[in-house]
Image: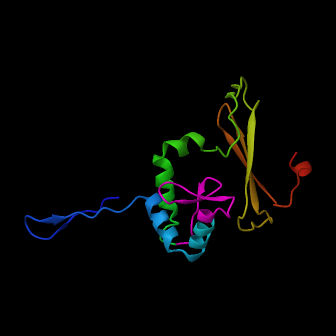
């Protein structure tokens, strides 16, 4: 990441370059006492699940070890890294079911043939004791009926 240059003189400017996320994680791994103990075990051949890669990154079953470090474990940095990483994009798991084919609603031919219903609740009590409104909408003409009801009405009463 490149920071904006700070002007020192009219002719001289400085440029500061920060390391990428992976390099920052590897540097933080070297500062962590627990991970250094694991690194010693890896080098002596005592650890099966942990390994050390060519850039001195400590990994667990092929995945980079993360620390509970607020400076590193920044969701925005990780999302930015994953967004730019080609491998991450190719193996990214989708967390939703596959979409089905689109099926448009059939167009009604007559008024009040197809209706939609909803209710508005949480209203103040009227003089007759109603606390909700039952809304019935015709899909063809978009006309609606607003019927005051009690919130306690069941489907049998509404039918």
Instruction: Please state if 120 lies on the left or on the right of 24 as rendered.
Output: right
Magenta region, residue range: 42-69
Rendered position, 50 above or below 93 = below
Instruction: Please state if 157 lies on the left or on the right of 5 as rendered.
Output: right
Residue at the bottom extreme, as displayed: 33
Depth check: give the residue in front, 59 or 19: 59
Residue 119, percent across and down? 74, 53
Residue 66, percent across and down? 57, 64
Residue at 79% across / 62% down in the picture?
130
Residue at the top extreme, as displayed: 109
Image quadrant where one finds the C terminus: top right
Residue 138 in magenta stretch: no
Please identify the quarter of the rendering in which residue 39 is found.
Answer: bottom right
Residue 19, percent across and down? 38, 61
Residue 66 in magenta stretch: yes
Depth check: give the residue in front, 16 or 62: 62
Rendered position, 134 above or below 5 = above
Residue 109, percent across and down? 71, 23
Residue at 56% across / 72% down in the picture?
36
Depth check: give the residue in front, 54 or 126: 54
For the rendered model, the colour scheme is rainbow
Please identify the quarter of the rendering in which residue 4 is found.
Answer: bottom left
Residue at 48% across / 46% down in the picture?
85
Depth check: give the residue in front, 122 or 111: 122
Please identify the quarter of the rendering in which residue 61 is found.
Answer: bottom right
């Amino acid at each position: 990441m490149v920071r904006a240059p700070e002007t020192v003189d009219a002719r001289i400017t400085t440029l500061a370059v920060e390391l990428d996320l992976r390099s920052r994680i590897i540097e933080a791994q070297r500062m962590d006492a627990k991970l250094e103990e694991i690194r010693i075990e890896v080098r002596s051949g005592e650890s099966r699940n942990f390994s050390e890669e060519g850039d001195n990154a400590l990994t667990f079953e092929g995945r980079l070890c993360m620390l509970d470090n607020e400076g590193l474990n920044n969701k925005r940095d990780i999302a930015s890294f994953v967004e730019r990483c080609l491998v991450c994009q190719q193996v990214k798991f989708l967390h939703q079911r596959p979409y089905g084919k689109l099926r448009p609603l059939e167009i009604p031919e007559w008024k009040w043939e197809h209706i939609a219903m909803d209710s508005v609740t949480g209203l103040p009590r009227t003089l007759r004791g109603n606390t909700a409104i039952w809304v019935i909408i015709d899909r063809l003409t978009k006309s609606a009926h607003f019927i005051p009801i009690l919130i306690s009405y069941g489907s049998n009463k509404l039918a």
